[in-house]
Amino acid sequence: MLTTGQSRRISLVTLSIPACAALWLGLAPARGLAGPPASVTWTFDRLDRIGGHLTTVEGNPKVIDTPVGKAVLFDGVDDALFIDNHPLAGAETFTFEAIVRPDGGDFEQRWFHLAERDAKTGQVTNVDPKTRADTNSRFLFELRVVGSQWYLDAFVNGPGYSRALMVQDKLHALGRWYHVAQVYDGAEYRSYVNRELQGKAEISFRPQGPGRAAVGVRLNRVNYFKGAVRQARFTPRALSPAEFAKVPAG
């Protein structure tokens, strides 16, 4: 007859066999070992809700029909959407993509902003009183307008890293639809327009926490965007250009 201690030892061994087999086969238990989230796509075909999240609408952005599908048009003056979600929070590597049509306007435009909410202040933008620099961890898609053309500025910032990828001689015509992307593979940060490399740099990226997004302007309401945004996709791994979202034919 088995003692109580022997019964417990046999039970533990028996219960451990399925768990070991699952690990050997690469199967995670149902609880406790959740993998990274899948890609998240935000389609800008309405104003009240984007990617399943309620929005705060400012100014008078409009949903328009375009050759690539419905999109949200921003006037470059006071139009903006604010969304209480940071879709790349927790990602150690990432691909941040968007389908966008720049239409001109001011030289400097910060049109897609993802920012971590500061755990101490509760703010998504914190300005250092001495340097006037924003200290929050963040991603930004920006652009610069030069005559009838524009160039991309991709930017990422956080503790121990801050890098802008801005190549002034890689110019693109206004009034057309483009795919833009910024990618980090664990070592190198890269930016693309229509799958063509724009700039790259080595950085020591650290994952960002939950926060907020702004589209059409920076979160502190400066540098408004003139143009339209069709879609954005957020992936917690580095995609190759061949894996990027495609601009619909139009």
Image (cartoon, rainbow, N blue to C red):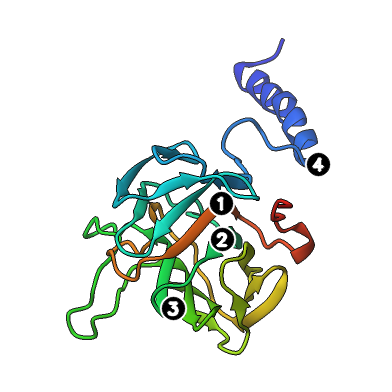
Look at discs 1 and 3 and give the one toward the viewer: 1
Q: Of 236 and 109, which appears nearest the observer? A: 109
Q: Secondary structure at mark 2?
A: strand
**Mark toward the start of the polypeptide (2 vs 4):** 4
Q: CA distance from mark 2 to mark 4?
A: 44 Å
Residue 7: x percent and y percent? 66, 18
Circle 3 Cα neighbour tier, 10 Å, few/some/many (<14 / 14–19 / ≥20): few
Disc 1 residue type (three-letter): Arg
Label 1: which residue?
230
**Left or right of residue 11, residue 212 in this image:** left
**Mark toward the start of the polypeptide (4 vs 1):** 4
Label 4: which residue?
24
Residue 118: x percent and y percent? 29, 60
Q: Which residue does the image show at 52% across and 41% down from the upper left?
A: 45
**Mark toward the start of the polypeptide (3 vs 4):** 4
Q: Of 238 and 171, which appears nearest the observer? A: 171
Residue 100, numbered label: 2
Residue reaching furthest to the top: 1
Q: Secondary structure at mark 3?
A: loop
